[in-house]
Amino acid sequence: MAALVLDDLVLSASRRPELLESEIELCWVQSADLEFDKHKGETWRNGTLAVTSHRLLWLKPEHDADHQTTSSAPARDCSLPLSSIKGHRGVNSFFKKTPRVILSVWRSAEGRPACAEAAQAEELDEVSVALRGPSGSYDTMEKNLTLALSRQEWKRAPLRKTGLTVGETYALATERQRGATSSARVGASAAGIGGLVRKQREDNLRADKSIDGAFKDLAALMDKAREMVDLSAKLKEALRENAESADDTNDEDKGIEKFLLTLGITSVVTKTTAGSMFHQQLSQQLSDFLEEPLKKSSGALALVDVYCIFNRARGIELVSPEDLIEAAALFPKIGAGMRLRKFESGTLAIQSSEHSDEALYEKLEAMAQEGGKPVGIGPDDVAGGLDIPLILAREYLLMAEQDQVLCRDDGPDGLRFYRNFFRDLFEY
Amino acid sequence: MVDSSFFSGGGYAYPDFYAYPPYFTLQPVKETREKQMSCWRDLVVSFTRANRVFEFETKTFELFENKSINRSLNESARKAIVDDLCAHGLGETCEGSGGGTVRVLWRSLQEWQSCVLDWAHRTGRRGDVLTVEELCDSSEVAGEEFRGMPPSMMERILRTLEKQKKVMIFQGTDQDDLGVKFL
């Protein structure tokens, strides 16, 4: 019998796994080996394992130094749907050094993991996960795996249907909350226009609650995740349709769109789920998340703004400023297309790697001229001209001054900056 | 002290950068400031020489304000320029002025000394007695470079010459009246 063939796992640019719709991560553990027991010798070593609501994810080590050339199937990032797991047992004995979780997996004739319900799934295979990481990894993984398996999230059909209006999505979301007890009972109070208005108000209230409230624990989060994703996806879609139908998309729509972009990270990286890998995971999630906002704001964002939009997108489990800085400081290590920048004044910002000071200076110098005549520019001009936040515009000006590109005029109009003609005077 | 013809549009051509507002703000970045100071140094010397200004009040010096662009150097900038002038031997603060009055040395003191001696020799003044006032401003010194020099500055020059036994200074009848005899 050939080895079990696991599904490929798609990673984002920052090596975060691409999750399925409404899939959320439950935990991460480091130094996990996959052992395909029935096929001796095949062990994928030292990867990173995640338990999500739908799958087990395994990421091969980034620097695959001890890559086994003898192996017929080299280690790769892979995933195993929880639906194919028949059962699992843990081996965590005092006498054995490495705790293991042994999974029995349904497999199809082609050797792929198969859903238990699928008729062709007749054979069972075994995969063990050896947890060589810090003590506690075993408990974490065992606990979360049991939780995920018992909840069977994957069995719930996605809420999303095509052609629903925003209102209907709201209604669906609230319907789920009400459950069977309060099904459509028509009473006198619900009749007529007054009744409709009242119903609408109640619905709105519930929808609000479902957005604001009660993401108390992981189990509750799993319930909510799907609804939230649906809601935000629906809103975005409706907005896009609007934009297409109306030729002139007004600023308000754009504003809302911008706002929605910052909504909705389904599976947030938390200390509970990521454990010791928290900062790295957070860094990866942050860099993926910031790609779009960075593009929209000319390649630079003040860290305070990042803090706000990132936490708004998380919704729950807010990150602390310290964690955010630490995560941002890891960008070079994870090869993200952005970096943390500290200005003289201590202001922190995140800049796209494409940013170059030289190009910036050229732009600033160009702005400080009007028809060949020198003019003074202030932070407001730069913020408007480069479409960047005021706080960064100010930093850029001071930076350019420091590098002798500009010089200051502390005149009656406040602080303005001019081309540094002193430098020109001494160049010849 | 300043030749008034200058203000009626005569003669002195300001450099282009005199119309740039940042020129009137003390630059905080060291390299830029050094260049700025160098520009000011050159301008002060060239302006005072062209307009035969020997002394100026730091607080009210015309050059430190450009009304046409509505800019004026602030106090610390003025002080920085004066300090820089002095450090380069191009100026000194006048005795007893509390640093408020600055003597610009668009000619060095040695140059002034030889200037005065040269005049005395040229016009056969050896043995003659003149008042310092006369030496500074009278028909006797018409057309000389030191004409219009403040008496205090002339005295400063003569005191040095006295030490070199080139002149003798004695008190006149009046308290302020100094006489000088070229030896």
Image: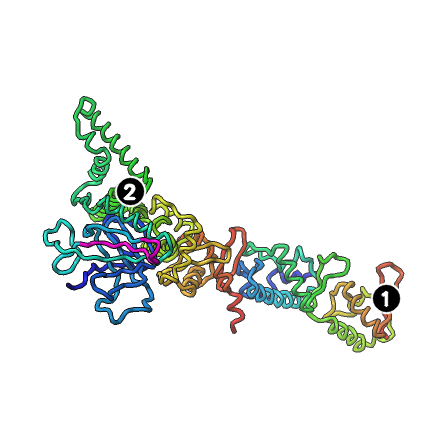
State the separation of the CA atoms marked 2 and 1.
106 Å
- Dot 1: few (<14), some (14–19), or many (≥20) neighbours within 10 Å? some
Q: Give the farthest residue toward the right.
A: B173
Identified by mark 1, the residue type is Gly
Image position of B71 (left or right of B171): left
User: Picture coordinates of residue A184 (x, y %)?
Assistant: 17, 29
Q: On screen, A129 above or below A266?
A: below
Identified by mark 2, the residue type is Ala
Disc 2 target residue? A219
The one of A392 and A361 positioned closer to us in this rendering: A392
Query: In this orientation, does residue A298 appear?
Result: no
Query: In this orientation, does residue A221 appear?
Result: yes
Q: Disc 2 or disc 1, which is closer to the eye?
A: 2
Q: On screen, A136 above or below B118?
A: above
Res B144 quadrant in image: bottom right
Decide: marks 2, 1 in contact (CB < 8 A)?
Answer: no
User: Picture coordinates of residue A124 (x, y %)?
Assistant: 16, 55
The one of A5 and A195 positioned closer to us in this rendering: A5
Q: Which residues are magenta?
A: A92-105
Res B146 quadrant in image: bottom right
Chain name for mark 2: A
Chain name for mark 1: B
Q: Give the farthest residue toward the left.
A: A119
Disc 1 target residue? B179
